[in-house]
Image: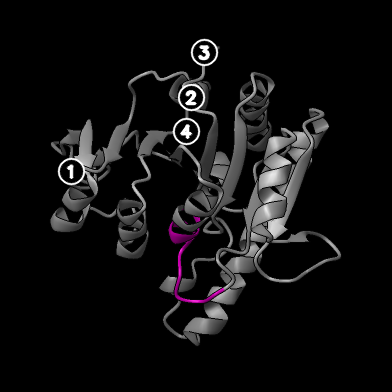
Amino acid sequence: MNPIYKRVVLKLSGEALAGKKGSGIDTDTIMRIAKEIKEIQKVGVEISIVVGGGNFWRGANSKEMDRTTSDHIGMLGTVMNALALQDGLEKLDVITRVQSAIDMKQIAEPYIRRRAVRHLEKKRVVIFAAGTGNPYFSTDTTAALRAAEIEADVILVGKKGVDGIYDSDPKINSSAKKFENLTYIDILNLGLGVMDSTATSLCMDNKIPLIVFGIDDTGTIIDVINGKKIGTHVKED
């Protein structure tokens, strides 16, 4: 391997961890992703991970529940995913720490930036759980915020069922056009749904590159780390 990044934030949707099951946690998918992360970690790349919770609950889509309560349920879903991913990594002897933005000291460390950076310097994988700890903020925003805080080189967004950013939903429109390169202004102006506007603006303001790629096939995380041109690359002008 010839990694081109030293420190990365890997953003995984909850749906990606569900595999073909569609919901919940698929152990085979967890182990496949964990094996790729181990290969990357072995060559010295500092890896942090932000996990979503959509395989359990999507807070923003709950119309009959108080939004704050709904978002808190979603945060708990991300903690479950983080613990499952930690378990998969540690079965492969990869030292891993889960840091939660909501205090739950019996099962996870509190999120402390300096401690997270120290773990990364010691080549431990750090998984950020519970989003930002606040309702109304997505895990996309969490990925942008943590990347800025730990001074990551790039955010890698692994998507299930799609291999980049398109001008419309390729699952619905067979003529959808895939973008190879975009700016953050393009995402905002075109209303592309890859990240919410808060996360997009945060990445733009802090000049954090973003790569959106498909995670369904084995080896794509390694390919991106090695600089292979796959997915969609987003950066400032």
Please tell me the numbered disc located at residue 173: 1
Please tell me the numbered disc located at residue 215: 4
Q: Amino acid at mark 3?
A: Asn
Of callouts 4 and 1, the N-terminal one = 1
Q: Position of residue 155 (x, y in %)?
A: 44, 42
Q: Secondary structure at mark 3?
A: loop
* Cα–Cα gap, marks 4 and 3: 20 Å
Of callouts 2 and 1, the N-terminal one = 1
160 on left or right of 111: left
Q: In the rendered view, would you say 77 is above or below 45? A: below
Q: Secondary structure at mark 4?
A: loop
219 on left or right of 80: left
Nearer the observer, 46 or 231: 46
Q: Amino acid at mark 1?
A: Asn
Q: Quadrant of the C terminus?
A: top left
Residue at the far top in the pictured view:
1
Q: Nearer the viewer, mark 2 or mark 1?
A: 2
Q: Secondary structure at mark 2?
A: helix
Q: Position of residue 182 (x, y in %)?
A: 21, 40
Give yes or no for contact between labels 4 and 1 (Cβ–Cβ under 8 Å).
Answer: no
Magenta-span inclusion, residue 137 = yes
Please tell me the numbered disc located at residue 2: 3
**Residue at image location 16% in from the left, 49% down from the top:** 186
How would you rate the neighbour count of disc 1 (Cα within 10 Å): few for under 14, some for 14-19, many for 20 or more? few
Give yes or no for contact between labels 3 and 1 (Cβ–Cβ under 8 Å).
Answer: no
* Cα–Cα gap, marks 2 and 1: 30 Å
104 on left or right of 226: right
> Residue under circle 2?
225
**Residue at image location 46% in from the left, 21% down from the top:** 4
108 on left or right of 168: right
Residue range corresponding to the magenta coloring:
134-143
Q: Nearer the viewer, mark 4 or mark 1?
A: 4
